[in-house]
Image (tube, rainbow, N blue to C red):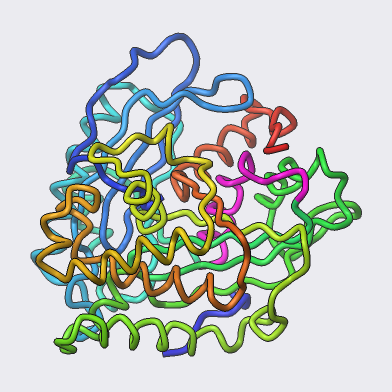
Amino acid sequence: MTPKRPAGADAFPKTAVEPSAARQPEEGALYAALDLGTNSCRMLIARPKGSQFQVIDSFSKPVQLGQGLEASGRLSRSSMARTVHALQVCRRKLEQHRVRNMRLVATEACRRARNSRDLLRTIRRETGLQIETIGAEEEARLAVISCAPLVSHKTETLMVVDIGGGSTELVWIDLEDVEPKERPRAIMRLSDGFGNPQPGGARVVDWISVPLGVATLRDQFADVEDDQGRFALMSWYFEEMLSGFTPYAQGSPDEGFQIIGTSGTVTTVAASFLGLRRYDRTKVDGLEMTSDQIDRVIHSYLQLGPDGRRADPRIGRERHALIMSGAAILQTLMRIWPTSKLSVADRGLREGLLYSQMVRDGVLAAEGLNGVA
């Protein structure tokens, strides 16, 4: 399996379905963003508010769309049925809120499956929703711009890591020529593409989409019975897939390096570090964790073993089977590019979709971003 090259949030779940209509909409057009991933179907409905947006409603459900994909190259009937059922719920929410501005996308599982067109036709027939499959570069770009508010003014070199269900995107960005206070806004401007850097703007040094995420990496080593041995093999295999990524050979960068991690793995590790028995996004999003703190959490997961992880309320029933493959990816990245800390982002593709739509329509000014001092 070869990583995809530049030729072309999942957030920690509290429950299978997030509460409906937590806030009543006020005046102003609503926007929706839906991410149909390898493991989950997730949607946000939001209204622009100043330089940010206010979430009106949300939905998240594990559909395991990629189950069996590694072995067969096809989406199974059962996974397609679960996906259609989840999207019927999404359609009702979109109708309830009378959303007209929306972008509904599918990612790695639909990029790889031989029968993904059959799924998209079935979705259109059964739900009326038009799902588009986006390429790896656009997926990476959307994850990057969602993290713009977390970029520090002190950051000269930035790596954004998005650990998904079926793939992991890494984007290495040079901000040295950007005025410090402009750095978050420079990241937002990357929504136009990675290949056309502007003078004084952010420059994408390299990016990669590794076709290994928490579900696909787990499936690669499902037959290995030893828990710690399986973890070591997953870490080694993921590192092997990074060999063509230019910054891989450059070693640790100088001061001014920031890693932002966005995924359910990263937010789960953060929640475990904080000892949260009930997830609290306000405590997790923007949290900084040191490499030692991350290693201690991952070591505690290994000590628990499969049964202990299944029962641990910090991990949650939805994530226990996937946390070690995600942890193997995360620990590999922190080992390759040793840095004192990781910025945790409870945001990702959906937020990127919302930002890009709102900036395009002129209802959300990228210039309003402040970033982190």
Magenta span includes 146: yes
Q: Residue at x 21, y 31 (%)?
A: 92
- Where residue 239 appears, x then y in whole percent? 48, 84
Q: Residue at x 31, y 72 (%)?
A: 325
- Where residue 217 appears, x then y in whole percent? 31, 78
Q: Residue at x 54, y 76 (%)?
A: 335
Q: Which residue lies most toward the top here?
A: 27
Q: State the predominant SS element of the stretch in magenta.
A: helix
Q: Residue at x 34, y 85 (%)?
A: 232
Task: Please state, as top left, top right, bottom left or bottom right, where the C terminus lies in the image.
Answer: top right
Using the image, determine if residue 224 lies above or below residue 354. Answer: below
- Where residue 326 appears, x then y in whole percent? 35, 67
Looking at the picture, tell me which residue is in the foreground, 163 or 75.
Answer: 163
Looking at the picture, tell me which residue is in the foreground, 273 or 177.
Answer: 273
Residue 104 in sight: yes
- Where residue 43 appears, x then y in whole percent? 33, 40
In the displayed structure image, the side of residue 55 where residue 36 appears, left or right: left
Using the image, determine if residue 304 lies above or below residue 112. Answer: above
Magenta span includes 196: no
Task: Please state, as top left, top right, bottom left or bottom right, where the N terminus lies in the image.
Answer: bottom left
Using the image, determine if residue 45 lies above or below residue 179. Answer: above
Determine the image quadrant of residue 322: bottom left
User: Which residues are drawn in magenta?
Assistant: 136-154
Determine the image quadrant of residue 208: bottom right
Residue 110 in sight: no
